[in-house]
Amino acid sequence: MAAVEVTWPGGAAAQDRNARFEEIVRTYGTRVHTLVYRMVGSEADDLVQEVFLQVYRSLPRFRGEAKLTTWLYRIATNRCLDHLRRRRRTQTRFLSLDEYAQDCVLEAAQPGASPEAGTEALDLTREIRRCLTTLPVELRTVVVLRDLEGLEYRQIAAVLGWPLGTVQSRLHRARTLLKQQLSPYLEG
């Protein structure tokens, strides 16, 4: 992923800002891209560029009151939520061919998997992704941050600006809905 190049007037402050930004992109670029992809699917690349443009513009205002990762995840999550709200108004979400192809590649790359196991895993992967897209945005967001990104409850609360109890209750609700939707696959 290429960094956003913005030219600023010279000076030590601008050079320091550019160096900090490049380090952020180098260190966290893949994690941010993964988060955004899990939230919006194949539209992630453009949205990641928007996220890092906002990070660059906001870098002088970052005071370190929150962890850098929490700040980055909050920016990325807010961009994703805005994007999903706009998209929901204009279209229905379908699994794209890019997402399907990526799933196939990931499953085929697993060593020692039998063809049947690979097919079953691929079916379950697609069904999980489909079920995630049917969840309300707030529930999907908390599942992605906790179960796919591995954030702790307190980090999620900080990223989303929610009370800890709200994070816990929405995660419980999301998991319950996913379990109900996936029960035919999990029983077999």
Image (cartoon, helix red, strand yellow):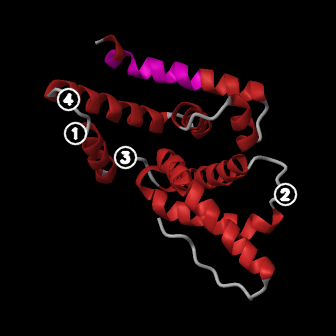
Residue that badge 1 annotates: 108
CA distance separating discs 3 and 4: 31 Å
Crowding near the residue tagged with mark 1, few <14, some 14–19, many ≥20 C-alpha atoms within 10 Å? some
Crowding near the residue tagged with mark 4, few <14, some 14–19, many ≥20 C-alpha atoms within 10 Å? few
Q: Nearer the viewer, mark 2 or mark 3?
A: 2
The local secondary structure at tag 1 comes to helix
Where's residue 130, x and y in %? Answer: 39, 36
**Residue numbers of the magenta segment:** 173-185
Q: Nearer the viewer, mark 1 or mark 4?
A: 4
Residue that badge 2 annotates: 63
CA distance separating discs 1 and 4: 10 Å
Amino acid at the residue labelled 4? Gly
Residue that badge 3 annotates: 94
CA distance separating discs 2 and 1: 45 Å
- The answer to whether residue 24 is seen in the rendering is yes
* Above or below, 177 relative to 32: above
Residue that badge 4 annotates: 112
* In this rendering, position of residue 186 left or right of residue 28: left
Q: Are marks 1 and 4 in contact (CB under 8 Å)?
A: no
Q: Are marks 2 and 4 in contact (CB under 8 Å)?
A: no
CA distance separating discs 2 and 3: 40 Å
* Above or below, 165 relative to 17: above
Amino acid at the residue labelled 3? Phe
Q: Residue at x 79, y 31 (%)?
A: 163
Amino acid at the residue labelled 1? Ala
